[in-house]
Image: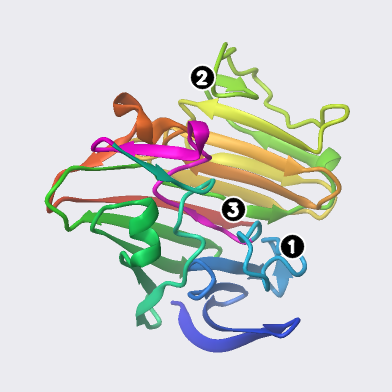
Amino acid sequence: MSTIQTGTYEKYGARYATLTLTDGAYALTVTPEKGGMATSFTKDGREYLWLRDKNFESTDRPRCGIPILFPNCGKPDGGVHHFAGGDYPIEIHGLADLVPWQVKTACDDAIELTLRPNGLTKFVYPFEFELTMRYTLAGNTATLALTVANHGDADMPFNVGFHPYFAVSNLDNVRFDIRAATCSQDAKGPQPAAPAQITLTRQPGSADSIRLLTDVQSPMVFTDSGNGHKVTVAFDERCFGNGVLWQQDAERFVCMEPWNGWANSVNEPAKRETLAPGAQKAFAWSITIE
């Protein structure tokens, strides 16, 4: 059974309250003020997530830890969503990872955080949403469950995803075990069938590497022969149909991400989620570390 601990992260002049669930050798830390995201997942003190030095402490988008993507995954065409005849500018991956979340409950069983609209969110997303993020830990498996609720009087379009950054020794040491229908480097244009062995290799002259996967089967797994880590991302395929692999050159991380939309999906009725007034929907997935 997990137990809860409170703590403080302090570095480079920044100070954040943290909440940590522990279960034996395993510990999962959440930082509510930093986009409500998980910022550490350790086994015997060995870190499986990745924090970019100084990025976590800045006011920039947290390109580290496990950012929550809402109401969009990626950036829509022209950086704009279209709702009821209006145009609303939105950042890449939405708004949830840019603002502090509130602690709803923090006990041995779970950490629950909430996010509701404010002046900033309404400027970019004019809906009466409520997000509830629930973190639990059972041994070496952390479960992350996001519930999206529509408290307004109009249908609410959105997509959700997660952007976990996993620490790796070197990209060349990483082997993926993933099954998907297609595998491409761009969600637009031809979508070739996924190979039997999906790889994430650097392109000459490119600063990063990406693979976009459709009809992904749960789980997605990678092993790192350099540090001995194995990471399994399991999910409800009815909630997350897409997967993303991403790595930035010269950095020691790999992102293995469950998504349910692409960059412009919120603008495309057939590719987005829509909640009726008063409705809600949960999106759950898990990470197992070995």
Considering only vertical position in the picture, is 225 above or below 135? above
CB under 8 Å between discs 2 and 1: no
**Closer to the camera: disc 2 or disc 1?**
1
**Residue 71: where, in percent of width, then height?**
39, 48
The amino acid at mark 2 is: Ala
| Tag shown at residue 52 | 1
**Closer to the camera: disc 1 or disc 3?**
1
- N-terminal of the pair, mark 1 or mark 3, is 1
Number of labels in the image equals 3
Asked if the magenta segment contains residue 22, the reply would be no
Q: Which residue is mark 3?
A: 164
270 left or right of 170 in image = left
Question: What is the crowding at mark 1: few (fewer than 14 residues within 10 Å), some, or many (at least 20)?
Answer: some
Q: Residue at x 56, y 50 (%)?
A: 163
In the image, 78 versus 13, the foreground residue is: 78
Q: CA distance from mark 2 to mark 3?
A: 22 Å
Question: What is the crowding at mark 2: few (fewer than 14 residues within 10 Å), some, or many (at least 20)?
Answer: some
- Residue stretch rendered in magenta on the structure: 65-85
| Tag shown at residue 160 | none
Q: Residue at x 52, y 49 (%)?
A: 91
Q: Which residue is mark 2?
A: 181
Q: From the image, which quarter does the N terminus lie in?
A: bottom left
